[in-house]
Amino acid sequence: MQIWKRNAVVAVIVLFVCVALYMSWSYGRIPEEDLPELDPVGSIGVEPIPADGPDGAKPEPAAINSTYFDEARLSRLEARDAAYAILTEALVSEEVSQEVRDNVSGEIEKMAQDALTEANIENTVIAKGYVECVAIIGQNGIKIVVAEPESGMTSADAAIITDVVLSESSIEAADISIVHVSL
């Protein structure tokens, strides 16, 4: 009976971890239909996301920066906090085997490394002269959402951002998605 209880606890913890990871992925995910991808190698060829307000007027750039990018960061943080809380519960549980604790510890370490990588990428992209940037590392790569420069997004901009991601992470170029939001 003791083994059954332990296995049930481990199964529930694994389920919670999966749910937390899904929540982290879904909160950090930007719908593809809303934000077009930018091909860093070829020509841009996509229309920027309109930033028109409900009355059709363009909002001030500061409103977009403080709203969209701050909300994206907040969603990413909330999802990560929820996943972290679930993982730490599993880590301190007395009914969890050492193998599960090691796996949970590795997941927590990966989350911390991803958060540091995202912050480094965001800071470097902003240092390169872009107004705002949010980096979201997921299971299938990384999505970089950047405020479109006043002169418009070019393939040179995409190359700069791709170079930053390649230099700050171990993510492959094929797994980088760059999305620009017009101000």
Image: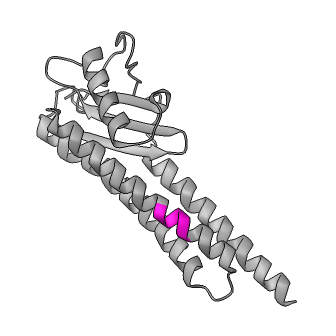
Q: Quadrant of residue 153?
A: top left
The x, y position of residue 164, in whole percent, is 30, 34
Camera-side residue of 112 and 79 = 112
Name the residue rendered at 21%, 30% in the picture: 55
Task: Residue 63 in the image: state x and y as whole percent.
Answer: 15, 41
Whether residue 128 sits left or right of residue 26 in the image: it is left
Percent x, y of residue 28 = 43, 48
Image quadrant holding the C terminus, namely top left
**Viewer-proximal residue among 49 and 83:** 83
Q: Measuring 33% from the left and 42% from the top, which residue is drawn there?
A: 168
Magenta range is: 105-109
> In the figure, residue 150 lies in which quadrant?
top left
Counting from the top left corner in percent of width and height, residue 112 is at 41, 61
Rendered position, 27 above or below 89:
above
6 vs 142: above or below: below
Q: Is residue 132 visible?
A: no
Front in this rendered view, residue 151 or 35: 151
User: Which secondary structure is most common in the magenta stretch?
Assistant: helix
Q: Is residue 20 above or below residue 178?
A: below
Query: What residue is drawn where x is 26% and y is 17%?
Result: 156
Q: Is residue 162 left or right of residue 2?
A: left
Who's the residue at 77% across and 77% down the image? 8
